Amino acid sequence: MNATLKLSVQQQGLYDITHKVNEILRGFDASEGLVTLFIQHTSASLLIQENADPAVQRDLENWLNRLVPELDPLYTHTQEGPDDMPAHIKGALTATSLSIPLINHRLALGTWQGIYLWEHRHNPGPRQIIVNVLSNSP
């Protein structure tokens, strides 16, 4: 079973998509299995992270922006703007796919865990995430 989650985000940042993934899963006839999420882009990524304190997301963004700055003179891929090559590096350092167990019709996330789209561009286009469930349950 699979579906495509289409998202529009406005700027760089972390976007909690847990509820959108759960909406898709409610349409599947699976109670047990493995949910795989795969983002079809090279300048955004996926992350499971704390969903209680927004300071966590700000700190992650600040840390990654410091680690991978824009306008580094080493970049040669600059045709798409000063945020493009850093976005590719950030995508390479983070994850393009996640695997989460599905148990009793629910994602087996911890109490403080959420699923995030991590947008690395300032002015991104539409984003697509493939949601796939491998299941033997009816």
Image: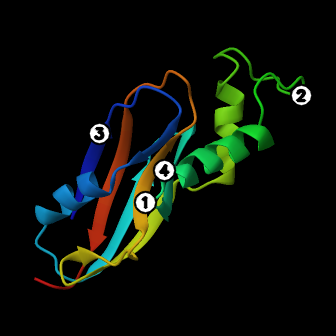
Q: Earlier in the sequence, mark 1 or mark 3?
A: 3
Residue 90 found in image quarter:
top right
Look at mark 4 in the image and give the residue it sits on.
54
Q: Residues within 10 Å of mark 2 (few under 14, many from 20)?
A: few
Q: Which label sits in the foreground, 4 or 3?
A: 4
How far apart are labels 2 and 1 at the CA level? Answer: 35 Å
Q: Check disc 3 and report the residue beneath it.
A: 6
Dot 4: few (<14), some (14–19), or many (≥20) neighbours within 10 Å? few
* 3D distance between C-alphas at marks 1 and 4: 7 Å
Residue at x 19%, y 64% (from the top left corner): 25
Instruction: Kindly give the residue lying farthest to the right in the view shown.
Output: 73
Marks 1/3: CA–CA distance: 21 Å
Of the residues shown, which amino acid type is indicated by label 2? Leu
Helix, strand or loop at disc 3?
A: strand
Discs 4, 3 touching: Cβ within 8 Å? no
User: How many residues crowd mark 1 within 10 Å: few (<14), some (14–19), many (20+)?
Assistant: some
The tag earlier along the polypeptide, 2 or 3, is 3
**The N terminus lies in quadrant:** bottom left
**Residue 101 picture quarter:** bottom left
Indicate left or right for 88 with 124 as reference. right
- Label 4 sits on a secondary structure element that is helix
Quarter placement of the C terminus:
bottom left
Amino acid carrying label 3: it is Lys
Q: Which residue is mark 1?
A: 51
Q: Amino acid at mark 4?
A: Pro
Q: For the residue carrying disc 3, how many other residues have a C-alpha within 10 Å: few (<14), some (14-19), or many (20+)?
A: few
Residue, x 56% and y 29% (percent of image)? 121
